[in-house]
Structures are given as structure tokens and as C-alpha cells.
Image: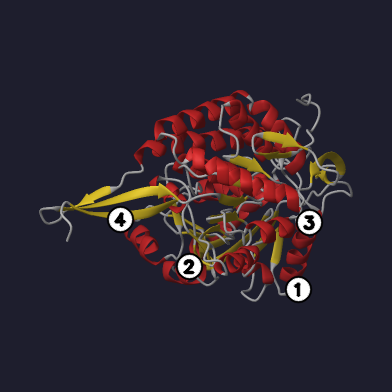
Amino acid sequence: MAAMTDYPDVGLYIGGSWRTTADDLPVVNPANEQIIGRLARAGQQDLDDAVEAASKGFEVWSQTAPKDRAEVLRTAAALMRERQAEIAHDITLELGKPYPQAKLEVIRGCEFFEWDAGEAVRTYGRVIPSAPGINYIVHQQPIGPVAAFSPWNFPMSQPARKVAGAVAAGCSVILKPAEETPAGAMHIVRAFHDAGLPPGVLNLVCGVPSEISEHLIPHETIRLVAFTGSTAVGRHLTGLASDHMTPVLMELGGHAPVIVCEDVDVRAAAVTSAVRKMRNAGQVCTSPTRFFVHDSIYREFLGTFTERAAATVVGDPMDPGVEMGPLANDRRLAAMIEFVADARDKGAEVTTGGSRIGVSGYFFEPTVLADVPDDARVMQVEPFGPLAIVNRVGSLDEAIERANSVPFGLAAYGFTNRADYIDRMVERVETGNLSINTLEASVPETPFGGVKSSGYGREGGVEGLHNYMVVKNVSHSISIV
């Protein structure tokens, strides 16, 4: 185990054993652009071994009593809680997330395991009423080995969602974390190893995304593909899976609207919005981004939001008091610069930020764009960074129309105290998750997923295990008929 001052080298975990490879990839600290570790790169033989291990692991785990599965999940979660500081330290180094926020992510990941441990013993079927002499019984059974792909922006809690649902349902998993932020997944695997999970139930493979997805997804052993990431990549992977009739669970990109009505506490709504917008440097698929504010409160909201965004403490994510660290990689930095330049060219006002900070590390200023025209690129493409758009609207109907104008529908938010406004938003906003007077899009006990180009299927809540199970109907006649 690496010391707390070090970042661990990340190996492959296949069939209950760790292995290294002759080829590897670097892991870079985005705060200083220095290489901090090495990541094993899986080859074709490693992937074949992982598939074979997952197949054998499924045979064992699918026949394990749900209460015993639940016990392993709870034990692993308890170990991760004990190791919270170490896991958070590694996440901060690889992602640039401020250390206190990384600690909270670890706990959130543990809560997914704990919730699904409870759900593991409640995957009920049902008996359908029938005529005398015949029974119809519906069973829920694990779907089989799962290929799970997690993104770089939440290195621990995103793989936790997939592993928790799959393992609770009785499936085996081949987990592929983001090559830029693999430590969270590695710590999950370590905890399950120490908790006594049978070999092959959980496997970890790392490396070049296209090499892994194109090898695993077409394999006949893989019965489900679970992916979180961009819409473009999700469509590509869905196409690979569809060629083999393999089901997919897709949690894809968003571009979350926030409707701010005229009856709210303007300052409270603006302050909480600015704080949440800059969390994880805005690199959150549910990040509040497109603010549609009623004209009567627009100037007050914009002024307060800008003031709080500008006051965000940006710096080394290990330093106490820092609220926002660097962007995760140079691609995001370049994207922010391009979004701001395009919006400016089209007439938007930059009320704060808009520029890179320094020359070392991927730091970017908290940025607010006002009066952004609809033809600006950032109005149609999720910025995935510390950039907020604040536009005025004349009515709730206009706000809803503009909220629905993009092809995404993962999360949406509203600030109002009027029951009729709430009803109108619930009925008409096109989204998988709508939050009123809060910017929390999901918790472990609620279902999470999108509509339109934001994907399909749900993680979390009682619905979270459904994608990892198949329905079998059994018709049993007492006599031969």
C-alpha cells in the first residue's frame, strides 16, 4: 500500500488476483501537469482472461443467497469508509477535486453500496392469479456478466453506482475506469477483495478505451453494457452493442436548465446556484448551467450570482479553504477558452472570469456569461466546466420552452414557491430528474437517468437493480394439458 504522500500505481485485477503489464499509461496531476503514477494497459489476453473470470464468477455469485451478497456489499462499504482519507487523497491528486469534496464523494459511493445491499434481498417476483390447476410465477434473475465503463469526473462514486447495482443483483462485472482517474475504482476493488468477494465477480481492466470497448462489447459472454459518459461515445457503444442484441444502460450528457421565477428569495437562489455551479469545477453531468431568470429579478440575480462566483476560492485542491481546483485535463481547458471566445463574438457579456489562471496546471476562472444568444455554441453544447449562462425570460412558459430547446434531458431545476408553477414544470420540463428549490439531482434511494439524448435506463432507487436483471415467467400446470 502506497504511503499517503504517494499516488498508487494501478494494476489490473482479474479472477481475484492483481497483475501488472509490460505496457502502461501515465496518470497526470492536473494541478501541476506532473506524472504521478502509472496505469497498467490491458492487452487482448488480459481482456480474454477477464471475460473468462467474469463468466466463472457469475456462475458462483448468481447462485449466492441475496443476504450473503448483501453482507459482502456492506463489509466492502465499511472498509471504504475506514479508508476515506486515503481514497480521497488519491482522487484529489488525479482529478484536482478539492480534498473535502473528494471525501464527500467517497461517502456518497459508500451510500450506493449500502442502499443496494438492502435492495439485494428485495428483488421480488410475483404470482399472477390464474385458473385452478395452473400457476404463473414471475422471477427476477441476474442478467449475467456486465461490462461497466465509468467516467473521469467522479472516480469513486460513478463506478460505485454500477458495481453496487450489478453485484447486488447477482451479476459479475468487468469494470473499466477512466484512464485519467483510475484510483477510485482500484480502491473499490481492493475493498471487495478484502471483504471476501469470490474471484471473478469483480474484475478491473484499464487502458485505451476503444481497445477495451471494441473487444468486450461484442463478446457473447457480456450480457449488459453499462456506461456513463458523453452522448457521442454512448451512441457509438450502443451501436456496438446493438449488433449483438446486447442491452445497454446509458447515463449520458446533460445541459441542465435552471428556471428562476419571480417569487423566490433572489439572493438565496443566486448564492446557492453559484456555489453549486463551481463544484468539481463544473465537471458534473447534472451541473446547473443554463439559468433562465424572470426579467423582474434578472439584474439582482445576475449581480449576486456574479459576485459569489467571482469570490470562489481557486487553488491547490489539497490546500484548506479551496473551493475549486483545476479542470481535469487540457481538453477541458481548451474547450472553456473556445466557448467564451465564441459567446463573446456573438454578443454575450462576460460578467466575471473567462480566462485561464496561470501557465501551470489546468486552472480556469469561474465564469459567468450574460445575455447569451441562442446561436452561441455554449447554448447547445454542455460546457462541462466552471461556466454559467444567465439569460432573462419574460414568463415561465418562455423559460420552459427554452429549457426544452436542447436535445438533452438529464437534470433540470426550478426555484419557485408557487404550486401552479411547480405543477407546470413537473408536467412540461423534459428531464429525467427535476429538483425544485434544491440543486441536488439524485441520492442513492432515488432513480437517476435521462431522457432524449441523455440516455435511458436508471441507476439508484428500487429501479436501479432492474437493468441488471431479467424477467422470467414460469407457467406451471398441475396436469399435462
Residue lying at 59% horizontally and 53% vertically, measured from the top left: 287
Residue 332 in the image, given as x and y percentages of width and height: 75, 57
First-in-chain label (4 vs 1): 1
First-in-chain label (3 vs 2): 3
First-in-chain label (2 vs 1): 1
What residue is shown with label 3?
Answer: 333
| Amino acid type assigned to the residue bearing label 1 in the image | Asp
Q: Is residue 304 visible?
A: no
Q: Residues within 10 Å of mark 3 (few under 14, many from 20)?
A: some
What residue is shown with label 2?
Answer: 399
What residue is shown with label 4?
Answer: 473
| Amino acid type assigned to the residue bearing label 4 in the image | Asn
Q: What secondary structure is marked by label 2?
A: helix
Q: What secondary structure is marked by label 3?
A: helix
What residue is shown with label 1?
Answer: 345
Q: How far, Cα to Cα, is label 2 from label 4?
A: 46 Å
First-in-chain label (3 vs 4): 3
Residue lying at 60% horizontally and 39% vertically, measured from the top left: 200
